Image (cartoon, rainbow, N blue to C red):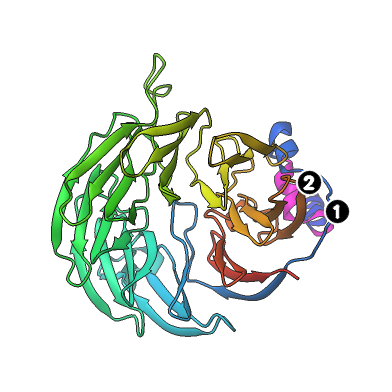
Amino acid sequence: MVKNKIYVLVGAAMMLGGCSTISGWFTDEEELEIRRLAEIDMVFTPQIEWQEEIGDGVDEYFSNLSPVAAYSKIFAADRAGSIYALSPDSGKVLWEQDISTDSKESKLSNLYGMFPARIPAKISGGLSAAYETIFLGTENGEVIALNEADGSIKWQVKVPGEVIVPPAIDAGVVVINTVAGVLLGLDADTGEVKWQNESDVPPLSLRGVSAPTAANGGAIVGTATGKLIVNIIDTGLTAWEQVIAKPVGATELERIVDVDSKPIVFGGNIYIVSYGGGLSAVELRTGQVVWNREYAAYQNVTVNGNTLYVTDNNSNIYAIDRRNGVELWSNTVLRKRGLTAATPIGEHVVVGDKWGFLHWLNQADGKIVSRLDLGGDDEDEGIYTAPIEANGKLLVKTREGDLNLISVP
């Protein structure tokens, strides 16, 4: 009888308050304080134009898997290996390709062989589009090229190390950066390895690497040892390297200086930030440091005009003059909410958080002016990669695989 009373009480609480109330019972006060969002004056109301479920999403795994808009389509994938092409107007699936593989294993999950089982492809590096091709990489150390028109596989090659960041493509070369510290240049038509470079990986580093940038004849990448390196994209020869952050401290944890952000090339300079603390502007041609400021981040730096936007390790957002490194404004209201990088769109920048909320900030002063709940305050529906700007609208994908196209008035 006592047990029945407990079940009734719990059931009533769930009906009255919803699952978030129940989860709150097991959350400490510090996290509850972070999860409480202050009321804002909504200047405009974002609209979800369509939503499409993309497989099983990425679940709780670390992932850089992000959609891409190209060739009058939207391309998206899930971790298991399903890749989709969708119509930008309606979200309708135009084609689907599954690169997972068959499994003959008999276990409870497939009722001991009664149903077919699949081995996940573990897509995390991608998606990238160029030369009428979609490029992606996997945690299994594979790089795959798909025809953008129908999803057919053009080529598939094995590389040394996990590929967990999107490839960069230019001058007929696909640049791949792996967790093992190996940077490769692959022929975009065939997947053949044109060149390969290796860099040191310290005993302790973040689960992540710098996504490469291919521009101006160079393959540009940050390293786990705090360096920025430019290689000649045709040959892989190193043009120059520059130290962005130096290890300090007595322990390996304190000495982490990973450069996990993607280098941004703009106006003759490269902009890059280190997890260990160092936002730098570096001359593309010479490798000379123009300025350096003490910001620590693993998310990508973004740029719009003369302003850089940085989401730091504690989810503080900064606007910085790219010409001199002067801070223009900061916003600490969303501190520790696991924010994505900031995406400039119109007069605003947009960030997502790990509980599934999108936040719009004024580019002029950093004030939050709008908000949209995509995840129901649930970490399973968190936003794990930065929103993608596509023709003045936003593509946003949640952990469970919901792809949303969002517009604002």
Q: Secondary structure at mark 1?
A: loop
The dot on residue 267 is none
Q: Is residue 230 left or right of residue 48?
A: left
Point out the stretch of residues depicted in magenta. Answer: 15-25
Q: Amino acid at mark 2?
A: Val
Q: Residue at x 55, y 80 (%)?
A: 88
Vertical comparison of 159 with 299: above or below: below
For marks 2 and 1, give the one nearer the viewer. Answer: 1
Which amino acid lies under the numbered mark 1 shown in the image of this protein?
Asp
User: Quarter of the image holding residue 281?
Assistant: top left
Please name the residue that numbered disc 1 is placed on: 41
Of 118 and 371, nearer the camera is 371
The answer to whether any part of residue 80 appears in the image is no
Residue 222, given in percent of the width and then of the height, sits at 34, 41
- Which residue is identified by label 2? 2
Q: Earlier in the sequence, mark 2 or mark 1?
A: 2
Above-or-below relation of 358 to 202: below
Is 263 located above or below residue 168 in the figure? above
Q: Name the one closer to the observer, 141 or 195.
A: 195
- Tell me which residue sits at (21%, 68%) in the image: 156
